[in-house]
Image (tube, rainbow, N blue to C red):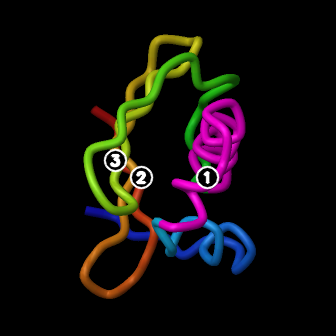
Amino acid sequence: MRILVIASSVIGASACPCVWAAQQPASIGQDLAATIALHGLPCDKVISSQHKGDSDYLATCQNGNRYHIFIDAQGRVVVQKL
C-alpha cells in the first residue's frame, strides 16, 4: 500500500473530522476530489460520497472511479482505489 503525504492545507482540513462535518455536502465533494487529485489519481468530479466514520469516506467520481479516503494510524491521508 502506498501512503502519500499531501499538502498541509488539505491534511489540516481532512485530519479533523469536525472540519469536514461542519462543511456543506457540496464542499465535501470538492475536498474529496482535491484530495484524490493531490494523490495523483484521476477524478474530475465527485458525484457521490458516503461518510463511513471519523475522516473516513467512500467517493465515486464522475469518470466511474471509486476511492476510499481515510486517515491512517500515523495521521496520514490515504486514498485507495476500489
Amino acid type of the residue tagged 3 in the rendering = Gln
**Residue 43 coordinates in the image, percent (x, y):** 61, 29
Q: Which residues are magenta?
A: 18-38
Q: Main secondary structure of the magenta part?
A: helix
Q: Earlier in the sequence, mark 3 or mark 1?
A: 1
Relative height, residue 69 to residue 47 (above, below)? below
Q: Residue at x 44, y 29 (%)?
A: 49
Labels 2 & 1 near each other (Cβ < 8 A): yes
Quarter of the image with the N terminus is bottom left
> Mark 2 — residue?
79
User: Who's the residue at 56% across and 41% down the image?
Assistant: 41
Location of residue 2 in the rendering, given as x and y in whole percent from the top left corner:
35, 64
Q: Amino acid type of disc 2? A: Val
Which quadrant of the view contains residue 9? Answer: bottom right
Instruction: Give the amino acid at mark 1.
Output: Thr
Report x, y in % for residue 79: 41, 52
Look at the picture and state if 33 lies above or below 17.
above
**Magenta highlight on residue 67:** no
Using the rendered view, name the quadrant where residue 73 is placed: bottom left
Residue 31 in percent (x, y) is at 66, 47
The image shows a total of numbered marks equal to 3
Q: Find out whether the residues at labels 2 and 3 contact each other: C-beta distance under 8 Å.
A: yes
Q: Is residue 37 magenta?
A: yes
Residue lying furthest bottom:
74
Query: Would you call the spot at circle 3 few (<14 residues within 10 Å), some (14-19), or many (20 or more)?
Result: some
Q: Please indicate whether residue 78 sits to the left or right of residue 26 in the image.
A: left
Residue under label 1, please give it: 35
For label 3, the residue is 80
Q: Is residue 35 left or right of residue 34?
A: left
